[in-house]
Image (cartoon, rainbow, N blue to C red):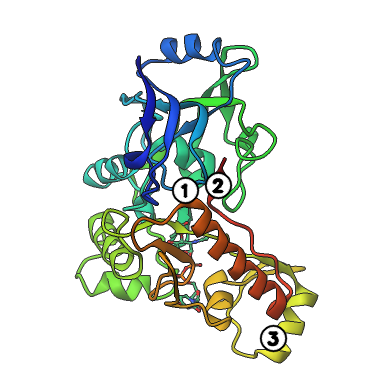
Amino acid sequence: MNIKYNYSLLSHNTFGIDVKAEEFIEFYTVEEALDLSKTLKQKKWFVIGQGSNLLFLNDFKGVVLHSGIRQMKKIKEDDQFVYFEVGSGVVWDQFVEFCVKNNWSGIENLSSIPGEVGAAAVQNIGAYGMEVQEAIEKVKAIDTATSQLMEFSKENCQYGYRQSIFKNQYKGRYILTSVVFRLSKKPNFRLHYQHLEEEVRKRGNINLQTIRETIIQIRSQKLPDFRTMGNAGSFFVNPVVSKVHFQRLQSEYPEIPHYYVSETEEKIPAAWLIEQCGWKGKQVGKVAVYAKQPLVIVNCGGASGSEIKQLAEEIQLSVKNKFDIQLQPEVNYIE
Ligand code: EPU
């Protein structure tokens, strides 16, 4: 276990916010995490991954926990699938790269997403027509209320679009230690998202490696690299609205993009709503709406968490006024 006091979180959040944690504790084994869980009862705490989906508003007056559990082991294999248990502290894209190299499919479309395995399973990361829950078999996590290691089947994780039980009912209760993935030995390409198939074909053969390379390229063209410009990817989730509401908007904006959700609901890209409100590429002080993808808010250098939050609130207000849609942040505010 590694404990630090009054510790700068600058290198632990992709927005590049310079705040401090009263305590920062990295654990390396399940046993260490179990011991730690017994000390948290009266304290304010949360678990950080790579800090790629959060915004610090202040110094954190409590304990920030970080998983250093980085084991990866094959636990089962049959004709069709290979099952891997992966520590919650493994860097997500390193695991994706490992699977692609071994020709195991199921997460290749999630290439190059910043973050770690534990957070990926909490957030149900998704991109290019794939969600991580599709490859998850189970999640192992410590219940801090009882200090016991529990196993969650995929069904018990209650996954939905950018949702899981760990973000809702059990928010702030569990510490994830590992995730068991089921990868397919027979490739099962998922290329229906926008022009993905066309782009992959430009590289010749369609295989896991060319899919991964294409996605890395698309992401690097559309999304800012947090190492040069602080950001946390999509700031908002894409809103789901009732069909009635959607039809009302469509009669006014016939070009409105949308995705089918169910007989009664449609999803609208938040990027489009934000662009329509004139925010694309706009800078306010040290904060800006990214010019190539308005769903991303960027720190132009030295911005505070509150300044970023303020711009996010202005965007929410204008989208609400123009479309009567309340955008929800995908980024977690940490007070
Ligand atoms: N759009 C605009 N203007 C723009 C950009 C996009 O109007 O400048 C509209 C277009 O209609 C476009 C649509 O938004 O077709 C969708 O854009 P894009 O394919 O870039 O995806 P997104 O819905 O904005 C989601 C995820 C991303 C993920 C991409 C690709 C959420 C909140 N975001 O973005 O995830 O990479 O799809 O699958 O669902 C992240 O979570 O950090 C993230 C980057």
Q: Nearer the viewer, residue 308 or 82?
A: 308
Image-based side of 164 in relation to 36, left or right: right
Q: Position of residue 37 (x, y in %)?
A: 53, 14
> Image quadrant of residue 237?
bottom right
The residue that mark 2 highlights is 332
Taking the view exactly as shown, the residue that stands out farthest to the right is 244
Q: Are marks 2 and 1 in contact (CB under 8 Å)?
A: yes
Pick the quarter of the image with the N terminus. top left
Pick the quarter of the image with the C terminus. top right
Q: Nearer the viewer, residue 113 or 211?
A: 113
Spatial CA distance of label 2 from label 1 is 6 Å
Q: Which mark is residue 250?
A: 3
Q: Residue at 57% across / 83% down in the picture?
A: 276
Mark 1, ligand 1, within 8 Å: the answer is yes
| Count of numbered circles on the image | 3
**Earlier sequence position, callout 3 versus callout 2:** 3
Q: Secondary structure at mark 1?
A: loop
Image-based side of 203 in relation to 293, left or right: left
Mark 2, ligand 1, within 8 Å: the answer is no
